[in-house]
Image (cartoon, grey):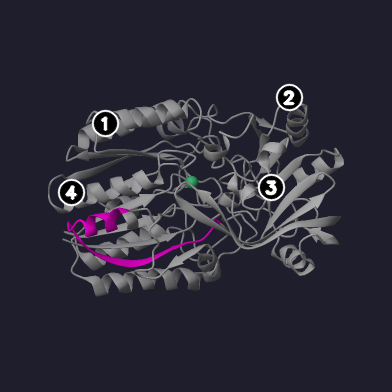
Amino acid sequence: MRVFCASIATETNTFSPLRTDFTDFEQSFYAAPGDHPETPTLCSAVFPALRKRARAGDIELVEGTATWAEPGGLVNARTWARLRDEVLDQLRAALPVDAVVLGLHGAMIADGCVDCEGVLIEAVRQITGPKTKIGVTFDPHSHLSARRVENADVITVFKEFPHTDFAETGENCVDLTLRAARSEITPTLSVFDVRMIDVLPTSRAPMRGFVDKMLALEADGSALSISTIHGFMAGDSPDLGAKIIVISDGNQNAGDKLAHDLGMELFSFRGTTKPEFLTVEDALTAANDAKTGPVVIADVWDNPGGGVAGDSTILLRAALDMKLKSLALATIWDPMAVRLCHAAGEGAQLDLRFGGKTSAFAGAPIDATVTVMKIANDAVQSFGASVVPLGDCAVIHIDGIDVVLNSNRSQAFSPDLFTNLGIDIRSRKILVVKSTNHFHGAFASVASEILYAAVNGPYPNDPTQTKYTRLTRPLWPIAANPFEVENA
Ligand SMILES: [Zn+2]
């Protein structure tokens, strides 16, 4: 059995002031055929899963390109065409193949193409013909189009947010796709459109129970696979919104019913899934009043993982104004400030302007006399088994506050974001991280408490206020009763 795999992944915030080109893919992760590391990345876990089977002699594997760009703004047209054609040419050269497995994100939008993954999967289908089995993995923060469903045989999606199960999702996709290619199963996709867009962290009720239910239904044989697309509210896509995917073994009616029932259960959770979001002042005051530390405060909307720059200074400015001590913040994206700190050297003092440069809505740059505590080339943090590059970094100190400046945009995943750069987190009272919920997995074990601060910025965090131009159907919360609108 011959299998081809490839991975093209990013998440496009069409409202972001940023733009994404090939350099962003290169800086985040780019592996030419054969160069993929042994460890998975978030969207390329199908590579190590397939290699394992190739080593066992089960398949002959032909690897294509694997690449990922940190979520950002619109992907430029030439970059999308280059990556698409690169992978499709590799596939043509690999023919004939029995199966194709693609590690995708599912929220990539390019200049001139609103459904990059749909176009890619359809092109793969046209090249391979109808018999080849096509398996795909998506991030739940994606847009599920009919084009993707029509052309793929197997779709699996991370169930967890934070996405701690990305390796399992890749394994499941590979397993089902290969079983289908051996004619052991007939994967049949059922999709239900939940018509809502919300933030759905699975580290807490009610989504925790919903994920456990999906897992139990898979375990008891009710379906081969069950997935929930959460949707990505910062992407202006005609397919915006939550969807349920059930893969049955050739039983369309049963799959459709299960997808419908799970979908309506998810719809009943609308508006109740998010943790309490505090104001900046309330979050900082509560953290400062806490008896033990470190209290972790998430700056939920200035999350580079959602496609904004991650250089907002609003929360840091408030902490400086409140004269808080014993606070560490990671990260503020500012390659120019990092360069100046590297030029000054460890231990140097300098007057530095940093942050607040890419958006009119993310606070003004901060001007301060800082001490350079640490400089590092090519710093990294971990995210489960995957290694996330931060680029050259500097830690600066201002009157009791340490700030990590980075030159590769990345959200906060793990405490080693601080400790790799010499910041002792257990001695700090407050840790501020830029992340919506991915930080939760690894920070929960070191935090005395976790607080979420909602700071307005360039991220479009209220769908009722966001100027979507491509919506094709009613969607909660923009429509109060999206299913009734249909019936009226
Ligand atoms: Zn995601």
Q: Which residue is mark 3?
A: 423
Closer to the chain start, of discs 1 and 4, is 4
Evaluate if marks 2 and 1 touch, with contact meaning CB atoms under 8 Å apart.
no
Which label sits on residue 291?
Answer: 2
Q: Which residue is mark 4?
A: 179
Image quadrant holding the C terminus, namely top left
Would the CB of label 2 be found within 8 Å of ligand 1?
Answer: no
- In this view, the residue in front, 40 or 240, is 40
Q: Residues within 10 Å of mark 3 (few under 14, many from 20)?
A: many
Disc 2 on helix, strand or loop?
loop
Residue at horizontal 62 percent and vertical 40 percent from the top: 462
Q: Is residue 175 magenta?
A: no
Which label sits on residue 219?
Answer: 1
Residue type, numbered disc 4: Arg
Closer to the chain start, of discs 2 and 3, is 2
Would the CB of label 3 be found within 8 Å of ligand 1?
Answer: no
Return the x and y of residue 93 as percentages of the image width and height. Answer: 25, 75
